[in-house]
């Protein structure tokens, strides 16, 4: 086995350990996790895999892919929290791997490694991989779809990649509805028109790709509509059009203002937003950004911008909705840092900022953990939580603080060691 392959397997093992180790360590949280676990449990009990039910009442708000996969996980591993959260955790791992391969195609291997590491450590991305929600599964499908678009753009024979786009887009529709077709479609169309790549547009709209999409995506919608005549109006009108416009009776959706996603996009990818700010503040950092090929920048910025822009226009907003914007931002950050490393002074500045963030954040979390351990019963009372949940969170915070402090101290010692070496 080559050294490169061994390192890749080690990185994958560490990724799986990080994303799978704790998913069974805390109870399912209401309302969403309880809902998305109960529906597949009832599928197994009733044997009806067509009509989703929640507490034996028809539930048509979302398509069935997450329910199906979670039901299979329950069947394989039992009715446990670990089995319930396995699908989003695996979706997170798959998204990181897809981000690496797409980053390698767009910006090179080193940039791909950095980008995958950036995505893995984004707090919003990691947190949502540990929760039984649909958004991580949708993000995995969308990332695969965009990988197919990017590959088709540069391929001589585009047919195979077009089929991949069709298949993964269809899975996305089965995961969360038409948004999984509309968003990648808008991104791909904007990018391919801007680059005048009409051949790829024709391939994506060719009959083999369209047929595959219809074969995968449409049958469940037809069958569930035949069995439940009320499904079409509820799912397509109420849950799509009216939820986007927040015009349904009963105030469908989560009404938020136009700047709702500003803090989400600043804090969700942290600390990497601070690194981007440090790079953007210097002329050398801006040159490093412009060193990224124009088409790569265009694709990644369109991808992230259209996702965030779409949900900003919607009156129904949740922080989880913009999760599909994080993979392109991670690739962009990886390519930017990769170019910045070519300049010694700039790379030292970036490494210094990262070291400071590791030590600062690790110290803050350690202090919080030291306060939480002796006061966990009072904290549980103040927050109306279970004492066991507070202890669990305190343990996670403690281990996170230890890891951050260890990484920060190690990087500082390596810096001192390099300084002490003779020139």
Image (cartoon, helix red, strand yellow):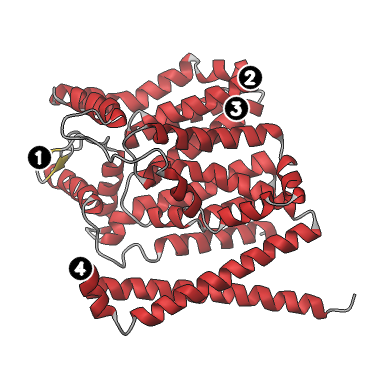
Disc on the earlier residue, 3 or 2: 3
Residue at label 2?
197
Q: CA distance from mark 3 to mark 2?
A: 10 Å
Above/below status of 366 relative to 144: below
Please tell me the numbered disc located at residue 289. none
Disc on the earlier residue, 4 or 3: 3
Element on which disc 3 rests = helix
Label 4 packing within 10 angstroms: few (<14), some (14-19), many (20+)? few
- Cβ atoms under marks 4 and 2 closer than 8 Å: no
Q: CA distance from mark 4 to mark 2?
A: 56 Å
Residue at label 3?
152
Q: Quadrant of residue 179?
A: top left
Label 2 packing within 10 angstroms: few (<14), some (14-19), many (20+)? some
The residue sitting at 17% across, 43% down in the picture is: 43
Disc on the earlier residue, 4 or 1: 1
Instruction: Please give left or right for residue 147 compared with residue 313 in the image.
Output: right
Residue at label 1?
57
Label 1 packing within 10 angstroms: few (<14), some (14-19), many (20+)? few
Q: Quadrant of residue 353?
A: bottom right
Above/below status of 308 relative to 417: above
- Residue 163 appears anywhere in the view: no
């Amino acid at each position: 086995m080559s050294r490169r392959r061994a390192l890749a397997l080690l990185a994958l093992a560490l990724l799986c350990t990080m994303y799978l180790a704790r998913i069974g360590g805390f109870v399912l949280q209401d309302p969403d996790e309880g809902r998305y676990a109960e529906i597949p449990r009832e599928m197994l009990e009733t044997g009806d895999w067509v009509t989703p039910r929640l507490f034996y009442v028809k539930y048509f708000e979302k398509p069935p892919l997450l329910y199906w996969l979670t039901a299979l996980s329950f069947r394989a591993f039992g009715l446990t929290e670990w089995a319930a959260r396995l699908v989003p955790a695996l979706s997170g791992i798959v998204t990181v791997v897809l981000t690496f391969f797409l980053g390698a195609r767009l910006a090179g291997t080193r940039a791909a490694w950095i980008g995958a590491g950036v995505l893995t450590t984004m707090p919003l991305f990691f947190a949502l991989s540990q929760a039984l929600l649909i958004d991580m599964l949708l993000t995995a499908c969308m990332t695969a779809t965009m990988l197919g678009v990017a590959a088709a753009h540069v391929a001589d024979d585009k047919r195979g990649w077009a089929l991949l786009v069709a298949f993964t887009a269809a899975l996305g529709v089965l995961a969360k509805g038409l948004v999984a077709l509309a968003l990648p479609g808008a991104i791909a169309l904007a990018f391919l028109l801007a680059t005048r790549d009409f051949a790829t547009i024709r391939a994506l709209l060719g009959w083999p790709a369209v047929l595959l999409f219809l074969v995968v995506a449409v049958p469940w919608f037809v069958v569930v509509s035949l069995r439940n005549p009320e499904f079409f109006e509820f799912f397509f009108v109420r849950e799509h059009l009216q939820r986007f416009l927040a015009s349904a009776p009963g105030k469908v959706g989560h009404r938020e203002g136009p700047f709702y996603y500003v803090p989400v996009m600043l804090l969700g990818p942290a600390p990497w937003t601070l690194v981007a700010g440090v790079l953007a503040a210097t002329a050398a950092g801006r040159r490093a950004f412009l060193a990224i090929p124009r088409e790569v920048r265009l694709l990644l910025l369109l991808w992230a911008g259209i996702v965030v822009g779409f949900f900003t226009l919607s009156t129904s907003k949740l922080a989880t909705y913009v999760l599909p914007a994080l993979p392109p931002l991670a690739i962009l950050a990886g390519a930017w840092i990769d170019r910045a490393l070519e300049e010694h002074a700039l790379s030292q500045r970036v490494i210094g900022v990262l070291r400071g963030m590791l030590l600062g954040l690790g110290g803050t979390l350690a202090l919080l953990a030291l306060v939480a351990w002796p006061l966990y019963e009072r904290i549980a009372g103040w927050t109306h939580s279970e004492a066991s949940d507070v202890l669990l969170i305190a343990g996670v915070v403690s281990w996170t603080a230890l890891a951050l402090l260890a990484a920060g101290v190690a990087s500082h010692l390596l810096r001192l060691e390099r300084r002490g070496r003779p020139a």
